[in-house]
Amino acid sequence: MPLIRTERDGRVAVITLDDPQRRNALSMDLCAELAAAMDEVESDDAVGAVVVTGASPAFCAGADLTQLGESRRDGLLAIYEGFLRVAGSPLPTIAAVNGAAVGAGMNLALAADVRLAGRSARFDTRFLDLGIHPGGGHTWMLRRIVGPQAAMSMVVFGERLDGAEAERVGLVWRCVEDADLLDTAVHMAARAAAGPPELTRRIKATIGDVADIAVHADAVDRELGDQLWSMDQPAFAERLAQLQARISGAV
């Protein structure tokens, strides 16, 4: 049975971890299927954004460490493959966290551009409790998203957050009712998917690049080339004409 289910909703691809009996744990097979699913949707011009979620009752219970085999390093890297593939996607990505996101399962949520949480979501790093050091860039991703104090509170001091608390500290963009979570994520993703595809990808790349820029003038330079490029594209001329027509009609 496939461990990943991919569905389309307009220009949005919904990728679901579909191993509910094991609470969608990151086995090597599941991670390989997740990477393959990302390859598929990225090669499809009809897809403009991706939502990643888990089959109830969990988002992702973390890594299946029983599968590492003789080479623990290679085994870990194989498990990382799935969420690193999401992190490296040029498409806009949203994690719809519908239950527990534990350990490496949190990594999958952190790998997305935006996280939305249901009321039943639970964010639990759990590495220290298990006696294992965080991996897969967990501390780097978490610290960049929530800052050093919240990262320390969760990873070292064992704080576990529900959906509302995750929204309060900025770990998720919004916490919604469980029944509304997937629709909210797809609706949000659809707005990104409706934009000109190459422009959307370039804007996402720019947001990533400017994270390492310390001087405003350098950010101006970084954006200028892509802004000039966008002004030469047909989509800009079409949308500008539509805006001008609406303004003229309103006068």
Image: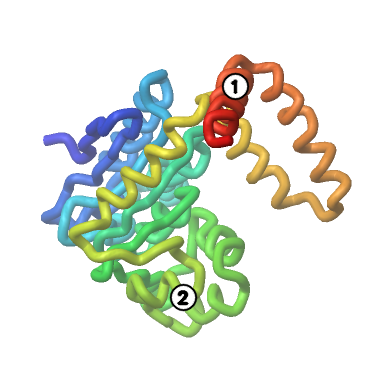
Establish if 56 lies above or below 228: below
Q: Which residue is mark 1?
A: 241
In the rendered image, residue 113, in percent from the top left (x then y), is placed at: 49, 49
Tell me if 64 is positioned left or right of 154 in this view: left
**Residue at the outermost bottom position:** 157
Residue occupying the point 32% across, 53% down: 96
- Is the Cβ of the residue at disc 1 closer than 8 Å to that at disc 2? no
Q: Earlier in the sequence, mark 1 or mark 2?
A: 2
Looking at the picture, which amino acid does disc 2 mark?
Answer: Arg
Establish if 148 lies above or below 205: below
Q: Can residue 42 be seen at all in this image of the molecule? A: yes
Q: Give the crowd class for mark 2: few <14, some 14-19, many >=20 residues within 10 Å.
A: some
Q: Determine the image quadrant of residue 25.
A: bottom left
Q: Nearer the viewer, residue 116 or 41?
A: 116
Establish if 240 lies above or below 55: above
In the rendered image, residue 70, in percent from the top left (x then y), is placed at: 36, 47
In the rendered image, residue 43, in percent from the top left (x then y), is placed at: 41, 20
Please tell me whether mark 2 sits on a helix, a strand or a loop. helix
Q: Which residue is mark 2?
A: 168
What colour-coding does the image apply?
rainbow
Q: Quadrant of the N terminus?
A: top left
Q: Determine the image quadrant of residue 18.
A: top left
Q: Quadrant of the C terminus?
A: top right
Residue occupying the point 33% across, 75% down: 162
Between the residue at mark 1 and the residue at mark 2, the CA separation in whole angstroms equals 41 Å
Tell me if 19 is positioned left or right of 159 in this view: left
Q: Nearer the viewer, residue 97 or 195?
A: 195
Q: Determine the image quadrant of residue 7.
A: top left
Q: Can residue 71 be seen at all in this image of the molecule? A: no
Residue occupying the point 32% across, 38% down: 34
Please tell me whether mark 1 sits on a helix, a strand or a loop. helix
Q: Nearer the viewer, residue 136 or 247?
A: 247
